[in-house]
Amino acid sequence: MSARSTLLLLCFVAYFGYSFQPPKPTKWVISKSCSLKVAGSTNINKFNCAIANYYKPDTLTFYKNTHNENVKITGKMELDVNNFDCHNPVMTADLRKTLKAKAYPKLTINFINLDKYPDFKEKNGEVKGKVNIELAGVTKTFDVNYKFIVNGTNTLILVGTRRVNFSDFKIIPPRKLGGMIETNDELDIEFNLNLKMMN
């Protein structure tokens, strides 16, 4: 084999060996003060409910690749539906009942991917991703818009937003007073994740 052929072969191996390196996992621990908020409306008013101060030492693993694109994620948030607070006892009880809290006490968000890894050279920015949301015994996949805030060298805040429908989860929106008050099908979900990179 000539020197030129050997050099070409080495370049080929080096290029493809570098290109096909397996994704590098980066582990992030969910830290305190995470939350989930839902906002909806009826034909006469609006309502806002939240699970505040969610904290479980769950871990999300980001699998970075050489291009930092289409980053796979494993990990989840698992929230107690009975922790929803609508700042009104009647409304809080109605929401928990509507979400079938007795039969399905957990709302789970399983993280699937991000379209790119957050750029830590920026203080904030936007990324997109996919999640599976499990609610009332039904699991659906959704695209999510995220805003990220870099809060130091090893901390990251992810704020995800998505509009869903009660009907996505085979839930009938509640009605009151013989149908005079009707809850609209749409719900706006916002979840805040405070993440700290594991050393």
Image (spheres, rainbow, N blue to C red):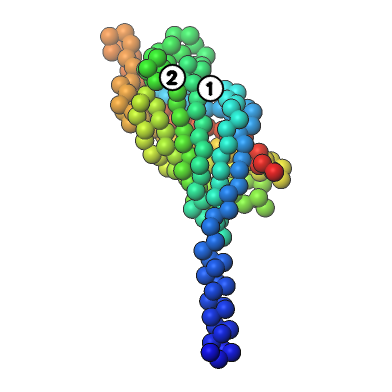
Residue visible at 67% across and 53% down? 121
Within-10-Å neighbours for mark 2: few <14, some 14–19, many 20+: some
Q: Where residue 172 is drawn, which disc sits there? A: none
Amino acid type, mark 1: Ile
Kindly identify which residue carries mark 2: 105
Quadrant where the C terminus is found in the figure: top right
* Residue 165 place in picture, x, y as percent: 36, 30
**N-terminal of the two: label 1 or label 2?**
1
Residue 147 vertical placement versus 64 (above, below): above
Front of the two marks 1 and 2: 2
Amino acid type, mark 2: Pro
Residue 91 seen in the figure:
no
Residue visible at 52% across and 14% down? 87
**Secondary structure category for the residue under label 2:** loop
**Secondary structure category for the residue under label 1:** strand
> In the drawing, does residue 88 fall left or right of residue 187?
right
Residue visible at 45% across and 26% down? 107
Kindly identify which residue carries mark 1: 51
* Residue 138 place in picture, x, y as percent: 34, 29
Q: Are marks 1 and 2 in contact (CB under 8 Å)?
A: no
> In the drawing, does residue 108 fall left or right of residue 52?
left
Within-10-Å neighbours for mark 1: few <14, some 14–19, many 20+: some
Front-lying residue, 94 or 106: 106
Front-lying residue, 102 or 144: 102
Residue 96 vertical placement versus 128 (above, below): above
Residue 168 vertical placement versus 52 (above, below): below
